[in-house]
Amino acid sequence: MPFDLLSIATLGLAVVVGILGMSGFLEWLFKGHVAWLERQKRRFSPDVGNVKFEMGVIYAVAILVLFALLYVFRTYPWVALVLWGVLLLGPGMYINWKWAKRLKKIEEQMPQAITSLSTAVASGLTLVQGIERLGERAEEPVRTEFALMANQWRAGSDVMTVIEEAKRRLKLPNFSIFASTITVNQTMGGNVVETLDRLAHSLEEIAQMQHEVYTATAEGRQNIKFLGLAPIPMLGLMCFINYSGTVMLFTTTLGQILTTVSLAFFFSGWYWAWRIVNADV
């Protein structure tokens, strides 16, 4: 019976792939994934590389992993499907997590970057030259963002267009304030050095207030992390006390339903608790 399930799943997958391949759907799907990977890589670096080759390798590995999961978990095919879903969603979630960490770091570096830009302009450089200097000397990851802006300007884009594009790409409060301030200054005129100094001072005060809120909610975050990890040792303890009863949660229909509902409530509660202690200031 297990081998019959594996044979049927393999044959069905081959038929679906053949039909979709003849209709051109796979080619369209591949192009869409290549474009997605290119966008994700461009978020972190101007050097995209050979995206088509990388996506081809990912496709080949994904097919091998799928067949391996179907074979290893042939007794419980639903486990293979769940793991496959996790593998499909995992890369996107990991990239979004890395991007969120990068944005947080850029947000923290913006006051110092604006101060450095103000110093560069006060020393006689133009605004564009100051941005180029930040793209060469600032700390990562804010240096990469200003380097991207400088590269776009060298390619022929207007400096205001470059700043607005970076604002749409990053969607950060501090950078949005910076972009709006530069836009107003370039449109209405005024002392750009004085404007940048005031902006940097304001952002430093905002950062200090956010740090105070972060410190005040530190205990709540620790409790949420502890509660998030608690089910794992508890499940191990239950297996040690009553192994047969615990296994029924994963091998019987009623147990699987109860497990699914419990996980849904658990992740929902964990998500909203985490949102509360990490509220934006």
Image (tube, rainbow, N blue to C red):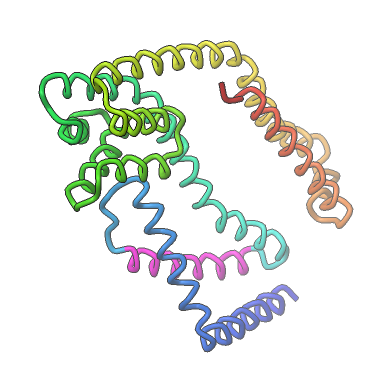
- Left of 189 or right of it: where is 121? left
- Near-viewer residue (9 or 91): 91
* Picture residue at 60% right of the left edge, 54% below the top: 86
Q: Farthest front residue?
A: 188
In the rendered view, would you say 273 is above or below 167?
above
Question: x%, y% of residue 28?
Answer: 48, 76
- Left of 4 or right of it: where is 70? left
- Count of picture labels: 0
Q: Farthest left residue?
A: 124
- Left of 242 or right of it: where is 117? left
Q: Say which quarter of the image contains residue 85.
A: bottom right
Question: x%, y% of residue 106?
Answer: 37, 30
Q: Quadrant of the C terminus?
A: top right
Give yes or no for residue 55 being in the magenta stretch.
yes
In the rendered view, would you say 212 is above or below 258?
above
* Picture residue at 50% right of the left edge, 12% below the top: 209
* Picture residue at 58% right of the left edge, 16% below the top: 218
Give yes or no for residue 1 being in the magenta stretch.
no
* Picture residue at 79% right of the left edge, 39% below the top: 265
Q: Quadrant of the N terminus?
A: bottom right
In the rendered view, would you say 131 is above or below 206?
below
In the rendered view, would you say 228 is above or below 52?
above
- Near-viewer residue (162 or 96): 162
- Left of 120 or right of it: where is 65? right
Q: Which residues are magenta?
A: 51-72
Q: Say which quarter of the image contains residue 6.
A: bottom right
Question: x%, y% of residue 36?
Answer: 44, 60
Q: Farthest right residue?
A: 254
- Near-viewer residue (167 or 249): 167
Question: x%, y% of residue 202?
Answer: 40, 15
User: Taken as a whole, is the magenta stretch helix, strand or loop?
Assistant: helix
- Near-viewer residue (123 or 251): 123
